[in-house]
Structures are given as C-alpha cells and as structure tokens.
Image (cartoon, rainbow, N blue to C red):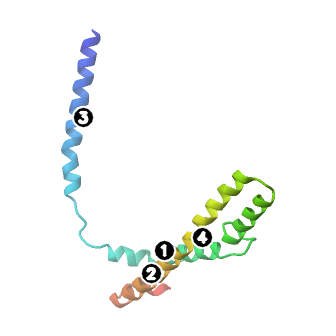
Amino acid sequence: MPTYRKAAAIGALALAGSVLAGAAPAQAAETPKGDGAKSICKRLPATQARIDKALKRLNGDATVVGSVARLEKRVAEAKSAGHTEVYTYLNDRLDFRKSLLPTLELRQKDLKAVSDWCGKQGSPSADSK
C-alpha cells in the first residue's frame, strides 16, 4: 500500500512541475509596453516628499532620531565607554548612513530633471512641487 502512495505523490509532483514549467514561458514572454513615464510622473510628488523627508532626517542635529549627527554621538559614547563590539556595530551603521547622503542627493537632483520633463509633457502631477 505505501508504494501506491509514493507513486501517487511522485505523479502529482510531476504534474505540478509540468504545469509550472508550462506557465513560466508565458510569464517571461510578457514585456513592458513602455518606459513607465506616465506612472513615474504620477508618483513624482510622493517620491520627492519621501526623499526630502529622508534627507531632512539624515541631516538633522543630534536630537533627531536617525540623523548622522545622533549616530556619530552614539559611536563616540560607545568608544569612550570601551564597548568595542557596540562601537564597531554602530560605526558600520554610521558608514552606511553617511553613504546614503550622496545617493539621496543625486536622486533628488535626478527627480528635479524628471519633474521638469513631466511638466513639459503636460503631466498635472509634476506641477504640484
């Protein structure tokens, strides 16, 4: 009796595999019908607000949670307290957080150019900011 169950299970797996394999080429054949410019222009104000908020937080002073200055202060405190493992962990986070600044500033600059382009195309969402 157990061999029949094994055979049935193997048959079911083979059938499921063939069904999934047949569906994969259909999904791969679907290609985008454009560059998504319309949706980018539509989401532009929200994207700009999100980047502005992140930059404001990162550039904040030591009282702002998530700022580079606050993390620098925590790194200095961990170092002075002799907590080497915590210092290493926080310092790595600080390095990453500092690397976010140029990336976000570049994205902000790029979005300004996209906003100008959307405005020339007559997109109503691009004029909101």
User: Which label is found at residue 26?
Assistant: none
Toward the viewer: 13 or 76?
A: 76
If you read the primary sequence from the N terminus, does the residue marked by circle 1 or circle 3 appear first?
A: 3
Callouts 1 and 3 close, C-beta under 8 Å: no
Residue occupied by mark 2: 111
Residue occupied by mark 3: 16
CA distance separating discs 1 and 3: 41 Å
Callouts 1 and 4 close, C-beta under 8 Å: no
Callouts 4 and 3 close, C-beta under 8 Å: no
Residue occupied by mark 4: 98
SS class, disc 2:
helix
Left/right placement of residue 76 relative to residue 128 reads: right
Residue positioned 42% across, 85% down in the render: 115
CA distance separating discs 2 and 3: 45 Å
Q: In this view, does 41 lie above or below 29?
A: below
- Quadrant where the N terminus is found in the figure: top left
Residue occupied by mark 1: 47
Q: What residue type is labelled 4?
A: Lys
Q: In which quarter of the image is residue 73?
A: bottom right
SS class, disc 4:
helix
Q: Position of residue 28 (x, y in %)?
A: 22, 55
Residue, far top? 1
If you read the primary sequence from the N terminus, does the residue marked by circle 1 or circle 2 appear first?
A: 1
